[in-house]
Image (cartoon, coloured by chain):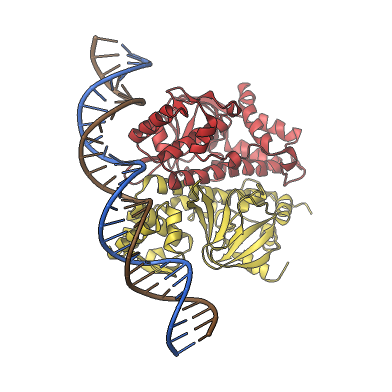
Chain colours: A red, B yellow, C brown, D blue
DNA sequence: CGGGAGGTTGACTAGCATCAATATGGGTGG
DNA sequence: CCACCCATATTGATGCTAGTCAACCTCCCG
């Protein structure tokens, strides 16, 4: 659609290529997807609950949360999406949103029409499977979040969340100590971990004083990755980030492109 | 493979047909899937954590839980699967199990080789998308469970769980009062809701005394669906059970069967 | 310089966990 | 058919984690 679209789509393609084998044809098809870039201000719902959308939202920059709420209006963030994520890929298959998408900080998204995604999966059947695989990793993250809020105390919940996002954002975790940009409020952390912002504040203080990590307004500084990881019982296995090339399965063996 | 397989596969096909449009060819392909029926005793892991599986497990009878655990060994059930569910459909795409599957009571499963599922999606590209759509409903259930353990108190958590399973098991909820078979222990309910079995016991007592529902060893008796639903803030929308035929989207328009 | 969102801290409360004791009931072996 | 056993259910007493309420601070932005 516009010249910047393919630049914006590269991180998405990289993500897919991490876990699946793509032919050159399929790569070109992904990069050729049309899209309209959009700036979203912090705390703004760009997909409302129950809304019927005709496009999926690829995160280009910033952070996006998926919000649901209980009967009393208490909010729960059920997923945090980072650049390169297709935040509502499932909307292709389920256009009526069962949850809202809100920018956690100022964010840039690329809106990709469902029609284009449908057309590309029709022309390249293997892409349907590749997108499916990617959304399965999102499901594994959801499972881990259930364990997090269901069976971990406040300190472990927050440590696990910080570890997961450091990992997903590609922070240099092997360094042991490092910083990564992470612009969220304590209230948003509370909504993601099923706690109150007051308690999040106390836990962050204890993480800081314990020399594990410091959470600032704009970034997180991890002081001791190993201890933070231990505190959060974090095992990155579920993120499927270390799939070896020969393990990148391919269900549909050839692409049978139909033009 | 054996004559009983297609009988066992019918509920699975029915489930898929609820949300997607299938051609006769695709229907036959689903019913023609090979499978080995297996009886699993209660509390038995039939897929272990980290195990590499080469087949998916279709639940034919009984109940199955997906188990994960935290560092102290406290267990969390992240999903409950009912007859007609393909419990680990994602294993086709991600063969290394990131969580264990355990029968909650005596159960019958049909093991379907990944190779057969790969072959069927290769021959009928639309099936890849149809299976993907189905797994998206599972993901929506995971989201709701996060809200449940994150932002609801014990009574609401259990009420919500009972409502969801009544609904998914096809209980006659329109009757207002009814029973449905649900053979789980209070300990298993605790593992699913992030509570202790002691507290589950107290909450079940209050649901019983409040005239909302009675949870027995073999079945649940709902006394007042509306009040139970209100107590659990249950809105079945996320289960996508009421999709109207014209809304059953189809991405890959024709099947282009390759034989 | 004023206002508002977000952060920080303290005092108190409540919901659920923990520990412990007893009851129940289905299954098994004698 | 009965006695026993083990898993599960039930109930009470007590403690702790996190929630609630409230005050004040800090920083950013207009």
Q: Which of A24 and D27 is in front in this view?
A: D27
Q: Residue at x 42, y 33 (%)?
A: A189
Residue A101: x %, y % from top left: 46, 35
Residue B138: x %, y % from top left: 53, 51
Q: Is residue B163 above or below residue A248?
A: below
Q: Nearer the viewer, residue B95 or A206?
A: A206
Res B89 seen here: yes
Using the rendered view, name the quadrant where residue B55 is placed: bottom right
Quarter of the figure that contains the N terminus of chain B: bottom right
Q: Residue at x 64, y 69 (%)?
A: B7
Q: Is residue A120 above or below residue C27?
A: above
Res B221 seen here: no
Q: Nearer the viewer, residue A82 or A243?
A: A243
Q: In this view, does A241 lie above or below B227?
A: above
Quarter of the figure that contains the C terminus of chain B: bottom right
Q: In this view, does A13 lie above or below A2?
A: below
Q: Nearer the viewer, residue A186 or A154?
A: A154
Name the residue at the right extreme.
B259
Q: Residue at x 44, y 26 (%)?
A: A215
Residue A157: x %, y % from top left: 45, 39
Q: Is residue A156 left or right of residue B133?
A: left
Q: Is residue A91 left or right of residue C10?
A: right
Residue A152: x %, y % from top left: 44, 44
Q: Which residue is drawn at 54% across and 30% down?
A: A225
């Amino acid at each position: 659609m516009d010249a910047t679209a393919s630049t914006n789509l590269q991180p998405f393609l990289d993500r897919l290529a991490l876990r699946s084998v793509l032919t050159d044809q399929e790569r070109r098809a992904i990069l050729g997807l049309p899209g309209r870039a959009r700036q979203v201000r912090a705390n703004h719902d760009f997909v409302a609950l129950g809304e019927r959308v005709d496009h999926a939202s690829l995160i280009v920059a910033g952070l996006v949360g998926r919000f649901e709420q209980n009967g009393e209006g208490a909010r729960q963030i059920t997923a945090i999406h980072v650049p390169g994520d297709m935040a509502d890929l499932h909307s292709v298959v389920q256009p009526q949103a069962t949850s809202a998408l809100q920018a956690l900080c100022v964010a840039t998204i690329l809106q990709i029409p469902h029609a284009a995604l449908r057309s590309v999966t029709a022309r390249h059947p293997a892409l349907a499977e590749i997108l499916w695989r990617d959304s399965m990793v999102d499901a594994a993250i959801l499972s881990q979040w259930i364990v997090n809020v269901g069976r971990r105390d406040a300190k472990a919940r927050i440590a696990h969340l910080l570890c997961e996002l450091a990992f997903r954002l590609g922070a240099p975790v092997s360094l042991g100590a490092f910083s990564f940009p992470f612009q969220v409020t304590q209230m948003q952390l509370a909504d993601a971990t099923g706690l109150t912002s007051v308690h999040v504040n106390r836990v962050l203080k204890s993480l800081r004083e314990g020399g594990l990590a410091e959470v600032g307004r704009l970034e997180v500084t991890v002081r001791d990755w190993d201890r933070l990881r231990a505190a959060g019982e974090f095992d990155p296995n579920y993120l499927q980030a270390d799939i070896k090339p020969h393990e990148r399965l391919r269900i549909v063996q050839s692409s049978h492109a139909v033009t």
